[in-house]
Image (cartoon, helix red, strand yellow):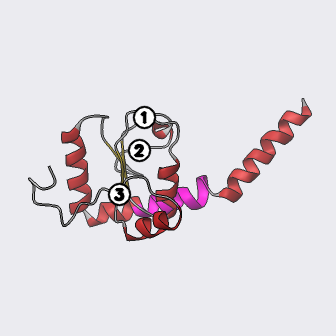
C-alpha cells in the first residue's frame, strides 16, 4: 500500500524497537500512533508522553480513563481505518492542535504519571493498607 500510494519516502516499518533505538526514534518522531484492539495501559503511550509527542490511539483498555479527544490525544475506533486516516490528517495539518497535544503529553509525563508522584501515591497506599 505504501508503494501504491507513493509515500515510501515518508513511511518506515521498524518492527520491535528497544533500548537506544527507541530513544532515537522517539526523538525524531512528530506524532505517536497506537492503533490497537486491546491494551491494559500501554507503556508505549507513557514513553511517547515523556517525549512530548501528540498521541493518536484507539480508546481501549485503560486509555479511556485519561483520554479526551482533541484535548490530550486524538482517538479513533479500533479497526476503523477511515477514522484513523481522518485523525492523522487532521493532526498533521493542524500545528496548533499538535502543540496543544504535545503540551498535554508533557503534562501527563511530568505531573500525573511522573515517577516521583507515582512513588508518593504508592507509598501512601501501602501506608493506608498497613493501618488495617
For label 2, the crowd category at 10 Å Cα-Cα, with few meaning under 14, some 14 to 19 and many 20 or more, is: few
Quarter location, residue 11: bottom left
> Element under label 1?
loop
State the image coordinates of residue 124 (x, y, percent, origin top left).
80, 45
Along the line of sight, which residue is nearer the eye, 4 or 82? 4
Compared with residue 66, is residue 50 higher up or lower down, i.e. above or below?
A: below
Q: Residue furthest top?
A: 132
Q: Residue furthest front?
A: 15
CB contact under 8 Å: marks 1 and 2 = no
Q: Which residues are magenta?
A: 102-113
The span from disc 1 to disc 2 (Cα, nearest Å) is 13 Å
* Residue positioned 53% across, 49% down in the render: 43
In the picture, the disc for residue 14 is: 3
Q: Which residue is mark 1?
A: 60
* Residue positioned 52% across, 53% down in the render: 46
Mark 3 vs mark 1: in front? 3
Query: Mark 1 or 2 closer to N-term?
Result: 1
In the picture, the disc for residue 68 is: 2
Could you tell whether 72 is left or right of 119 in the image? left
Location of the C terminus by quadrant is top right
Amino acid at each position: 500500500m505504501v508503494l501504491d500510494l507513493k509515500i515510501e519516502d515518508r513511511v518506515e516499518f521498524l518492527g520491535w524497537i528497544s533500548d537506544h533505538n527507541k530513544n532515537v526514534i522517539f526523538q525524531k518522531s512528530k506524532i505517536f500512533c497506537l492503533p490497537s484492539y486491546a491494551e491494559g495501559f500501554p507503556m508505549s503511550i507513557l514513553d511517547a508522553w515523556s517525549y512530548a509527542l501528540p498521541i493518536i490511539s484507539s480508546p481501549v483498555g485503560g486509555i479511556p480513563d485519561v483520554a479526551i479527544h482533541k484535548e490530550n490525544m486524538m482517538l479513533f475506533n479500533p479497526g476503523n481505518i477511515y477514522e484513523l486516516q481522518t485523525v492523522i490528517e487532521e493532526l498533521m495539518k493542524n500545528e496548533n492542535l499538535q502543540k496543544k497535544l504535545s503540551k498535554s503529553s508533557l503534562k501527563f509525563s511530568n505531573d500525573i504519571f511522573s515517577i516521583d508522584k507515582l512513588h508518593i501515591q504508592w507509598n501512601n497506599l501501602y501506608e493506608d493498607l498497613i493501618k488495617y
